[in-house]
Image (cartoon, rainbow, N blue to C red):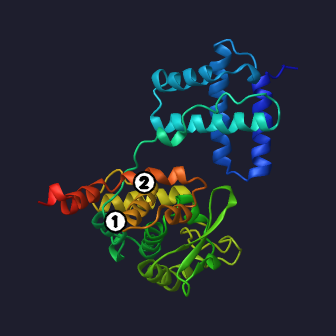
Amino acid sequence: MEKISPFDHAAREFLNWARIETGLSTSTLEAYGRDLRYMKEYLVGAGVKSPDAVRMEHLAQHLQQLKRERGLDSSTVTRHLASMRVFFRWMQAERKITRDPARLLDRPHRWRRLPGTLTPGQMRKLVEAPNAETGDLWRRDRAILEVMYASGLRASEVGSLKMNDFNATLGCVVVIGKGNKQRMVPVGEPAIVAIDEYLKETRPSLARFRDGRDHFRLFLSFSGKPIERVAVWQIVRKYSDLSGLHGVHPHKLRHSFATHLLSGGADLRVVQELLGHADIATTEIYTHVDQRRLREVLRKFHPREAS
């Protein structure tokens, strides 16, 4: 029987813990697993034989190697850093190591690229692009785009919405986000109208099957099954192309949602709650986005600029 290395054994225990205790998604667990394999390959190649022999310098050199030799972009390297921080924090908490070598590495949010956003005018073009000439499912697509922009939902969260998660009277949706954390998010009048029209005019025909394949989900595919994340990506790409907007993806709608809220004066903590961020540092990346507005305020109110 092949002997399991100390790194593989520790990673296996960590991933089992994360799967059972934290409720992380399958994709997140797979990403952790890949990141830890990359780390192990580098550390073993550098002569580090076990987790308790890892030092901060080893991890810093590994991150540099990911960026320099593997050519990974900053956001991907940031994820690797986050994976290592969680892994070694768990190792120390379980008393498998005496000190956390990742503790003093820079926090991931310092590495992140600033998110791309759309202007309010561009967002208006995008959400209004679906019409009777763009296909039979245009009302569904319009409702999806409206709720994504109105509530800052992830593509996976859109597909997970159930019928009773939408409350037109209260004007909100109940969202199950990462780690099965629940939050209630307002949707606004345009999204409410779009969802209502979809429910009346389109969903009944999509839910024509009586075999339970719809799983009581709000948004359905042509076959009557819950819409999947990849289909949400395709919808965003379809209508962004029709609108003459390129490089638009579901997360850019989420970025735009947060950006426009902060531009309008929303509190950062409120935006954090709406986005479902566990850490305010994740939301702080959006504080860069209104530099144009800040410059206008400076020109208007600063005594030297206004004179």
Q: Which one is earlier in the sequence, the residue at label 2 or at label 1? A: 1
Mark 2 residue element: helix
Q: Position of residue 25 (x, y in %)?
A: 67, 51
Q: Position of residue 38 (x, y in %)?
A: 62, 27
From the viewer's perspective, tell me whether residue 240 is left or right of residue 266: left
Q: Nearer the viewer, residue 95 or 8?
A: 95
Residue placed furthest toward the left? 307
Q: Name the residue under label 1.
A: 123
The image quarter in which residue 50 lies: top right
Q: Residue at x 82, y 23 (%)?
A: 4
Please name the amino acid that badge 2 sits on: Tyr
Mark 1 residue element: helix
Q: Which residue is drawn at 54% across and 54% down?
A: 280
* Disc assigned to residue 133: none
Q: Nearer the viewer, residue 267 or 276?
A: 267
Query: Where, quadrant-wise, is the N terminus in this rendering?
Result: top right
Query: Where, quadrant-wise, is the C terminus in this rendering?
Result: bottom left
Q: Position of residue 257 (x, y in %)?
A: 42, 63
Crowding near pointer 2: few (<14 within 10 Å), some, many (20+)? Answer: many
Please name the amino acid that badge 1 sits on: Met
Vertical position of residue 171 compared to residue 127: above or below = below
Crowding near pointer 1: few (<14 within 10 Å), some, many (20+)? Answer: many
* Disc assigned to residue 286: 2
From the viewer's perspective, tell me whether residue 205 is left or right of residue 251: right
